[in-house]
Image (spheres, rainbow, N blue to C red):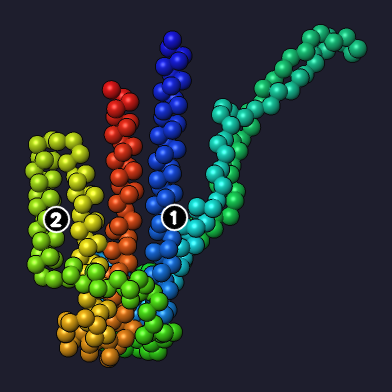
Amino acid sequence: MNWLSRASNGLFESSAHDDRRLLVRLALACAVPILLAYGLAGIVYGHLAMLTPAGFLDMPGASAWLAAMAGFALTLTTGHWLMAKPVPPMPPGPRFTLTTHTIWRAPGQPLRQVQLRTALPPEPSRRMRTPSLQGILLLIAVVAALSALVCAAMQSMGMSAFTRPRIALAPRSEWLLWPLPYVWRWLLPLSRDYIVTALTLIGGGLIVISAFLEALKVRGAWVLVGIVVPILVAFASLGSAAYDFAVARGLGTLHDADVVQALAVDPGRHNAYTFISLWTAIACLTTVPILFGLLAKSMDGRSRSL
């Protein structure tokens, strides 16, 4: 029955590999609308922010359009990878040819025939022979992102030429902020100080507990952090987006003169940061089912190995 156990193990390993590939494709498919919306926000509002190790970096004017170009290039890269057909595997073993040669005793008197095996040079990879469109798009994204960072650095040094002209197609438009015009009433309570403080304390407490469990060599100590913390960040970001959207437009009972002035003086910048808060929440909520899927597959694989 060894052949049966080997076949069943191979089936489970193949299924697990297919499931992981499916989860990766699902994650990339969720990233496509996020990257596309990010690029659209740059050209619609003429203002963007890029996440760096030091936090969100303000990018107005030309740097916003360059960051938008990077977002579009990453969208095309991800979409091309999702639609590309998998490359078939290379045939195993070395490549060679067999030739038959006749040994003659004398003219007209064959003695015997022998076969000679001649090794052939390795066949070039199919991936190398096809044009690497993904590589070109990824290079464009990297160059555009680095150029946006350089422009932002020039602006921080007082070179205002990179902020002129600040081209914004529709700085006051709200369609990229959907569904905030309809759900801000239910999301606004998430912006209250005590709720934000509670979310911060819960997240910090989970990180401390997970670090303690890791010190005790507990397996999967950071699983809860990976699932719960994105939800907490999403709640806080939704509250911030709802607050910036509603208060700046005089909706509800809250009043903040600074927020109202920010929308009146530079609507593109204010709406861009509202967009960043909203889509940060969307991105965080998108990761939760993917992390659940990875956790379920990991637990399923461990149960089969026992």
User: Which residue is denoted by mark 2 in the rendering?
Assistant: 203
The residue at the point 70 percent across, 23 percent down is 98
Image quadrant in which you'd find residue 5: top left
Mark 2: few/some/many CA within 10 Å (<14, 14-19, 20+): some
- Residue at 58% x, 32% y is 91
Q: Is residue 37 above or below residue 30?
A: below
Instruction: From the viewer's perspective, tell me whether residue 207 is left or right of residue 39.
Output: left
First in residue order: circle 1 vs circle 2: 1
Name the residue located 20 percent from the left edge and 65 percent from the top edge: 236
Callout 1 touching callout 2 (CB < 8 Å): no
Can you say whether 135 is above or below 306 in the image?
below
Q: Quadrant of residue 95 in the image? A: top right
What is the distance, in whole Å, between disc 1 and disc 2 at their CAs? 28 Å
Residue 40 place in picture, x, y as percent: 43, 74
- Residue 8: x and y in percent read 43, 21
Residue 297, x across and y down, in percent: 33, 37
Q: Which mark is residue 249?
A: none
Label 2 element class: helix
Is 293 left or right of 194, judged from the image as shown? right
In the picture, which quadrant includes the N terminus?
top left
The quarter of the picture where the C terminus appears is top left
Q: With respect to residue 217, does 41 lie above or below?
A: below
Residue 214: name its quadrant. top left
* Camera-nearest residue between 250 and 25: 250
Residue lying furthest right = 108
Mark number displayed over residue 29:
1
Q: Is residue 77 visible?
A: yes
The residue shown at (44%, 55%) is 29
Evaluate whether residue 143 shows in this view: no
Percent of width and height locating residue 284: 29, 58
Amino acid, disc 1: Ala
Q: How many marks?
A: 2
